[in-house]
Image (spheres, coloured by chain):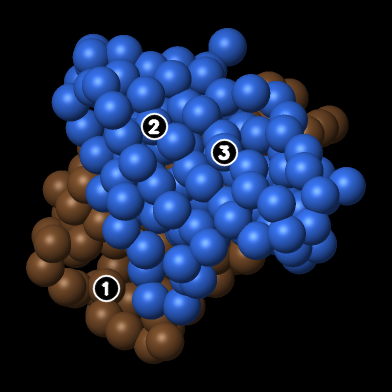
Chain colours: A blue, B brown
Amino acid sequence: QSVLTQPPSVSAAPGQKVTISCSGSSSNIGNHYVSWYQQLPGTAPKLLIYENDKRPSGIPDRFSGSKSGTSATLGITGLQNGDEADYYCGTWDSSLSAAVFGGGTKVTVL
Amino acid sequence: QLQLQESGPGLVKPSETLSLTCTVSGGSISISNYYWGWIRQPPGKGLEWIGNIYYSGSTYYNPSLKSRVTISVDTSKNQFSLKLSSVTAADTAVYYCARRGWYYWFDPWGQGTLVTVSS
């Protein structure tokens, strides 16, 4: 059972938008920055969003992040076949004194 | 362009010590404000943070693994290493090394190496 809760899966047609939620508590998301990762099949995770809403160089603006209270959201617009992957949120948990990740969300392009 | 590469045995016997090394290329490991970390992912499961090290040698470990984990750094070789003792089948996972930013984001990641614990 992950400290951060994500939906197991989301899906949408090409060109549509999906959002992935990441729910936590005051000991993690509520008081710490959130990052998001994309893991394509058989590959290492790749940083998509850091410090809640910042995109690393090279990440298209189709990917966006936001945080409100103890929840964070990753948005993907203009969905493409190449976006089919597992997506993870992550942050620090001050109660556990550990970096924690969500259980992951599988995005399917219909 | 910073790159990280894990290396080490792919098979470890139960009760023995897992040892992996991460080689950093395209940049110095001795850089301020960044840490170097290990994360693992059991087959078909999610990510688990193992611990971090700063180039000065300062470490921080996941409390759930702390009694069995040692992370060290060799700045002369631009490498950092992981040792996990008394392994069991539950430690079977893909082990990733990654650079850690100040606010606990990880980028870039190594390609990962599968370590299987089996006799």
Q: Which mark is residue A19?
A: 3
Which chain letter matches label 1? Answer: B
Q: Quadrant of residue B63?
A: top left
Residue B9: horizontal and vertical position, in percent?
69, 55
Numbered disc total: 3
Q: Which residue is mark 2?
A: A72
Check the image and report above or below for A17 versus B67: below
Q: Is residue B100 left or right of residue B24?
A: left
Which amino acid type is shown beneath numbered disc 1? Ile
Residue A87: horizontal and vertical position, in percent?
60, 43
Q: Residue at x 21, y 61 (%)?
A: B34
**Residue density around tag 2, few if under 14, some if 14–19, many if 20 or more, within 10 Å:** many
Which amino acid type is shown beneath numbered disc 2? Ala
Quadrant for the N terminus of chain B, please: bottom left
Q: Which residue is mark 1?
A: B29
Quadrant for the C terminus of chain B, please: top right
Which amino acid type is shown beneath numbered disc 3? Thr
**Residue density around tag 3, few if under 14, some if 14–19, many if 20 or more, within 10 Å:** some
Q: Residue at x 73, y 59 (%)?
A: A15
**Residue density around tag 1, few if under 14, some if 14–19, many if 20 or more, within 10 Å:** many
Q: Nearer the viewer, residue B95 or A10?
A: A10
Separation of residues labelled 1 and 3 (CA atoms): 36 Å
Residue B42: horizontal and vertical position, in percent?
69, 34
Separation of residues labelled 1 and 2 (CA atoms): 31 Å
